[in-house]
Image (cartoon, grey):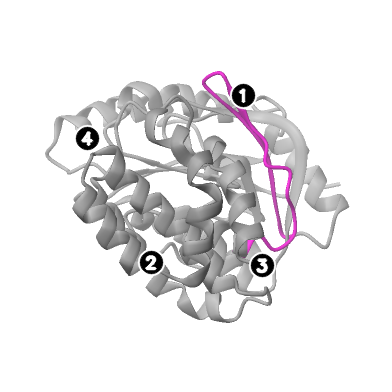
Amino acid sequence: MKLGLVSVIIPTYKRADRLKKTIESVLDQSYPNIEIIVVDDNDSISEYRKKTELIMSEYINASNVKYIKHSKNMNGCVARNTGLENCNGEYVCFLDDDDILYREKIEKQVKFLENNKKYNAVYCGRKVGEYIHQPKLEGDLSFYILSGKSITVTIMLMFKKNAIRDIKWNVKLHRNQEAGFLLEYYNKGNQMGYMDEVLCESVLDDRSNELNPEKNEKELNLFLKEYEYIINNLKIKNAKKKIYAFRYMGILMSYLKEKNIHMAIKAYIRGCKISFIIYLIQSFAGQASFLVSNLEPSWFSWSTSFSRVKTACS
């Protein structure tokens, strides 16, 4: 039986030193029918471009490795869209340029999708530093994503190409990029499958993507506006209240961590739904640890808070 081609799209920006290890983890897969598309998003005259070109020169004779260069930095969403426009696979994976796949990741995910026809995408668990990220949820996860719960990131996913053929990464977004892509996927009636195995590894980011609270709030408002039509169509009681409650709690807490009480109060007022007030009363004590602890990535530390939002807003 002929094995379906898997396209692995890798945008790269200022990480030539890690890119080779990522590529090699894909070339080392147990699944044999793979194409790799590296999209270089560095400025054409930068040192990072030169370093990336040097790395990619090692694969010049590899028939299953494509190297596409942007003329200037255009952001990760544009780079992923470039990859989609140039891929030929029946299945598609997206990696960051410092991700590592375990050897059987692609083979196992292809087999899952072949054996579970109701799903057009699947995700697995991943290792992040010392943590294991395994949300163990499946189906339509739009509500969780809109509420800020990180279920999946790109490295964990595999899509059937036909299911995302008409979906583009939203180039307006600087944050919540994966969330936006997945919301478009779910909005087309697609479901997400889950494999209870850790099959990949992410490096704890040394290139900070932290925004100050003001910019973070601006990005959040853009994200909620872009996908308001999906929020309004959710078949969940008080869905919009719950989403805004949880999202604005995060903004409020980020201001409080900077001891900016004035802006925290403004954020409270802007997000002041009835559900948010209830949530504050019921869970503020539980959120105190959020103010003083940065030991865990946000997707781990917010799971308890998320359940409180659902209860408070019911």
Q: Which mark is residue 49?
A: 4
Does 300 sit left or right of 98 as displayed? Answer: right
Amino acid type at circle 4 is Arg
Q: How far, Cα to Cα, is label 4 from label 3?
A: 52 Å
2 vs 4, front mark = 2
Where disc 4 sits, the SS reads helix
Does 228 sit left or right of 198 as displayed? Answer: left
Q: Position of residue 182 (x, y in %)?
A: 56, 60
Indicate whether residue 213 is drawn in magenta. no
Residue 172 in view here: no
Does 5 sit left or right of 287 as displayed? Answer: right
Q: Earlier in the sequence, mark 3 or mark 1?
A: 1
Tell which of 231 and 57 is nearer to you.
231
Q: Earlier in the sequence, mark 2 or mark 4?
A: 4
Q: How far, Cα to Cα, is label 2 from label 4?
A: 43 Å
Amino acid type at circle 2 is Gly
Does 53 sit left or right of 62 as displayed? Answer: left
Amino acid type at circle 1 is Asp
10 Å neighbourhood of mark 1: few (<14), some, or many (≥20)?
Answer: few
Residue 12 placement: quadrant = top left
Residue 20 placement: quadrant = top left
Q: Position of residue 3 (x, y in %)?
A: 77, 45
Q: Residue furthest left?
A: 45
Q: Earlier in the sequence, mark 2 or mark 1?
A: 1
The residue identified by callout 2 is: 271
The residue identified by callout 3 is: 314
Residue 165 placement: quadrant = bottom right
Determine the residue positioned at 69% across, 73% down: 189
Determine the residue positioned at 77% across, 41% down: 195
